């Protein structure tokens, strides 16, 4: 539960950067990853989930299916929220993909990840 506010802050920051500049800065994400490990209840699960999210999305990035910021967001969600973070990221990715198909333009993923996180908070709190 101690990860709720830091995750919200960093996801909000990433959303603003993604909407304004279509990129998410490495500096902010490195700080977010460090804070995520610091507030984690079990850093081993956080590490495994963060690496899992990173590896799966890095393969998508390598094939041109998503940007580097999306890879960083997947790792961040895994570190802050563990398995639930990866489930939320998958849900957000599905919505974002649907929006990209409907609008026929690439969509920034961070706002959808933030929206999924807000739904998660509403359900769990």
Image (cartoon, rainbow, N blue to C red):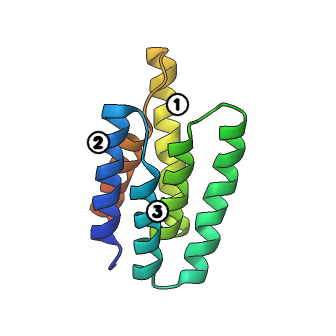
Question: Callout 1: helix, strand or loop?
Answer: helix
- Position of residue 111 measured from the top left corner of the image (x, y, whole percent): 35, 41
Mark 2 to mark 3: distance in Å? 17 Å
Residue indicated by mark 3? 30
Name the residue rendered at 68%, 51% in the picture.
56
Q: Which residue is mark 1?
A: 97
The answer to whether 30 appears left or right of 71 in the picture is: left
Which residue sits furthest top?
A: 104
Residue that appears at 71% across and 38% down? 62
Can the viewer see residue 2?
A: yes
| Residue at point 46%, 85% (across, down) | 41
The residue shown at (43%, 38%) is 23
- As helix, strand or loop, the secondary structure at mark 3 comes to helix
Q: Earlier in the sequence, mark 3 or mark 1?
A: 3
Q: Which mark lies nearer to you, 3 or 1?
A: 3
Q: Nearer the viewer, residue 124 or 104?
A: 104
User: In the depicted view, which residue is nearer to us: 13 or 53?
Assistant: 13
Near mark 1 (Cα within 10 A), the count class, few <14, some 14-19 or many ≥20, is some
Looking at the picture, does residue 52 appear above or below residue 73?
A: below
Q: Which mark is residue 16?
A: 2
Looking at the rendering, which quadrant does residue 51 occupy?
A: bottom right
Which of the image's four quarters has the C terminus?
Answer: bottom left
């Amino acid at each position: 539960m101690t990860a709720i506010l830091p995750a919200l802050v960093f996801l909000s920051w990433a959303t603003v950067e993604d909407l304004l500049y279509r990129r998410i800065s490495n500096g902010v994400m490195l700080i977010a990853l460090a804070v995520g490990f610091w507030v984690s209840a079990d850093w081993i699960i956080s590490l495994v989930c963060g690496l899992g999210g990173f590896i799966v999305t890095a393969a998508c990035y390598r094939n041109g299916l998503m940007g580097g910021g999306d890879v960083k967001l997947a790792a961040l969600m895994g570190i802050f929220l563990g398995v639930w973070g990866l489930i939320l990221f998958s849900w957000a990715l599905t919505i974002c993909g649907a929006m990209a198909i409907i609008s026929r333009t690439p969509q920034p993923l961070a706002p959808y990840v933030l929206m999924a996180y807000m739904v998660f908070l509403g359900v769990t709190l």
